[in-house]
Amino acid sequence: MTRLVLAWHGSADPRSVANTHDVVDHVRRIRPSLDVQAAFLDHATPTLEDALSADRRRAIVVPILLADAYHARIDIPHRISKSAAQKTIQANVLGHDGRLVRVLRQRLAEAGVSPHDPGLGVIAVAVGSSHDAANAHTATVAQALGIATRWAGASIAFATGPHPSLAEAAELLTDRGARRLVIAPWFLAPGRITDRVATEAGVHGIHMALPIGAHPLVAEVILDRYDAACSSPCAASLMDRFSSHGLAVACRGV
């Protein structure tokens, strides 16, 4: 069986690392026969290159990322190509899967948010990118959160990079009639950026829900990306083509 390597961004924050291992545990509980390993792009070990080089079996790398931007398009393929003699396929990112939006709705509910509150404005805060298409896709998260609610509105805000900022999103929703605001952090784990967002929110009196975190639905999305990569014609043909050479390949968009 092709092993599964989860490529996390990585963080110096121990809460983020703990979240990584919790997600791995969820994946293993759902599919105990699958060999699953976490690897990191920065701040933690093992690095993705080390994880791939240490085991020469076939591997599917699932980028544990919410946006199809720099890390998925450039960084991870480059790291795969540097790994020693691997037959490796890169799967798609987690992206804006509806199951992840469901988890974020659950985090809002846990924070006391009602979908029937007409005075509420919800700000989905995410990491921005220099890739405009990735930012446009991320903006759809706010739209998805607002479906079937009576909220005054839902808006995206970016913690880094492009506009709108948190302050700009707050002003937009206030102009739409929101009397109260809450932040839905579009992050997989707590860390330094979410702490910074929470600090800024506190200055403005805005409450913040928890990030997506470790959840069985996150594990389901990961396994779907793995299965799609395993079963794609692209992956099968490349594995056959390069099996005798042990080359690393990226087969994105499956």
Image: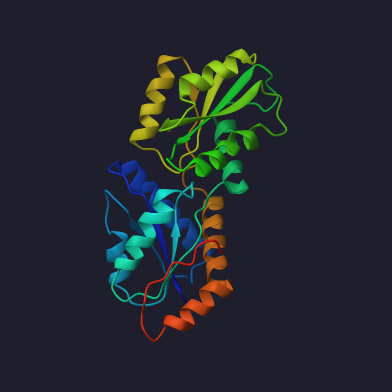
In the displayed structure, 206 sits above or below 217; it is above
Residue situated in front as seen by the camera: 236 or 1: 236
Q: Is residue 106 visible?
A: no
Point out residue 116 in the picture as x, y percentages from the top left corner: 70, 24
Q: In the figure, is residue 132 to the left or right of 15?
A: right
Q: Image point 43% across, 55% down: which residue?
A: 73
Point out residue 178 in the picture as x, y percentages from the top left corner: 62, 15
Kindly indicate the quadrant of the structure image that contains residue 49: bottom left
Q: Image point 32% across, 53% down: which residue?
A: 41
Residue situated in front as seen by the camera: 70 or 186: 70
Q: Is residue 115 visible?
A: yes
The residue lying furthest to the bottom in this view is 244
In the displayed structure, 115 sits above or below 26; it is above
Kindly indicate the quadrant of the structure image that contains residue 145: top right
Point out residue 152 in the picture as x, y percentages from the top left corner: 66, 20
In the displayed structure, 112 sits above or below 96; it is above
Point out residue 190 in the picture as x, y percentages from the top left corner: 39, 38
Query: In the rendered view of the protein, which quadrant contains the C terminus?
Result: bottom right
In the displayed structure, 153 sits above or below 237; it is above
Residue situated in front as seen by the camera: 18 or 144: 144
